[in-house]
């Protein structure tokens, strides 16, 4: 489903929710209390600003006696082949975040990837997949990057492990272009980039891939990812510990200025390597 038609479908979900709620004579606040979310959340569902989780869709069906229609629509809409199943919810939350802090121990984060780098990563993880599947995943990754082009884009702070700069994903030319893009976005102040050097030692072992997201109207959320799995963490105590781990990693990283110099140096190395092959 294309991104535009997908948004239109979520707008239909919201409009149908509003119609059935009003027909039942229930306010947003009343429905919210029945399904254990705020009335403001119900309003955001109806405006297609926020997408409900599956259990909320099920409780809406129960509250409005709609015979499972909202849960069935949710299943259809959330089945987005552009994203791995475990990442789909995190991708939706990225669009709502006012601040994103990320630690990348192995790969350039999806929000910063070039098409060629994204394709090389996707092929490596899906060596037997059809071209259509690879194309869907790459286009989904590039579409996520639209949030960084908006005037209301989130504050975005990334710490890259030095290994991210050294692993030649896709070959020297792909890596040179990818790191050039990271450097350009840092210079444009679209993203604040730091590099955690090899010399920092054990700090990189404190956590795997980590994304912290803050919102105007909801508690912060942490997202961690491993091989073919990911988990959203919203328990306040767990999120607090994730922030503490990120702060320690950030403190051990190079300054933004030194980090940019290291990224640009890696670009030059890859350019030289590409010219000799």
Image (spheres, grey):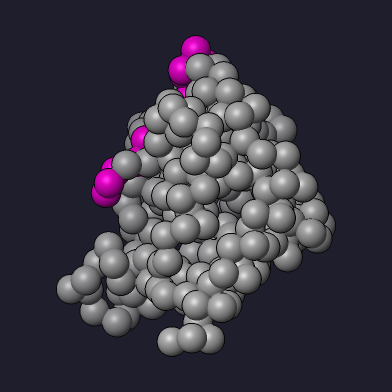
Given the current orientation, which residue lies at the most extreme top position?
237
Quadrant of the image occupied by residue 181: bottom right
Q: How many marks?
A: 0
Name the residue rendered at 65%, 54% in the picture. Answer: 262
- Left or right of residue 64: residue 32: right
Magenta extent: 227-239
Near-viewer residue (42 or 276): 276
Name the residue rendered at 27%, 46% in the picture. Answer: 227
Q: Is residue 186 above or below residue 238?
A: below
For residue 37, say whether it is visible: no
On the image, the x and y values in percent for residue 137 come to 39, 68
Given the current orientation, which residue lies at the most extreme left position?
128
Name the residue rendered at 52%, 36% in the picture. Answer: 199
On the image, the x and y values in percent for residue 217 come to 68, 30
Quadrant of the image occupied by residue 183: bottom right
Residue 118 magenta-highlighted: no
Q: Is residue 188 above or below residue 171?
A: above
Residue 232 magenta-highlighted: yes
């Amino acid at each position: 489903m294309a991104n535009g038609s997908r948004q239109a479908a979520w707008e239909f979900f919201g409009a149908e929710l509003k119609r059935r709620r009003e027909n039942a004579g229930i306010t947003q606040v009343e429905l919210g209390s029945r399904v254990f979310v705020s009335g403001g959340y119900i309003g955001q569902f109806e405006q297609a600003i926020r997408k409900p989780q599956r259990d909320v869709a099920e409780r809406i069906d129960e509250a409005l006696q709609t015979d499972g229609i909202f849960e069935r629509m949710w299943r259809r809409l959330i089945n987005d082949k552009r994203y791995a199943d475990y990442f789909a919810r995190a991708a939706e939350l990225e669009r709502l975040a006012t601040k994103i802090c990320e630690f990348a121990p192995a790969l350039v984060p999806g929000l910063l990837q070039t098409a060629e780098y994204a394709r090389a990563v996707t092929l490596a993880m899906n060596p037997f997949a059809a071209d259509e599947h690879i194309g869907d995943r790459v286009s989904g990754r590039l579409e996520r990057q639209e949030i960084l082009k908006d005037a209301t884009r989130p504050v975005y702070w990334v710490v890259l492990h030095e290994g991210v700069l050294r692993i030649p994903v896709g070959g020297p030319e792909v890596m040179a272009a990818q790191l050039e893009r990271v450097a350009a976005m840092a210079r444009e102040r679209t993203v604040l980039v730091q590099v955690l050097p090899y010399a920092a030692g054990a700090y990189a072992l404190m956590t795997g891939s980590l994304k912290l997201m803050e919102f105007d109207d909801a508690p912060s959320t942490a997202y961690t990812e491993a091989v073919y799995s990911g988990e959203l963490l919203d328990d306040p105590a767990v999120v607090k510990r994730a922030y503490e781990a990120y702060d320690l990693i950030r403190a051990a990283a190079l300054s933004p200025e030194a980090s940019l110099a290291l990224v640009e140096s890696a670009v030059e190395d890859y350019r030289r390597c590409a010219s000799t092959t």
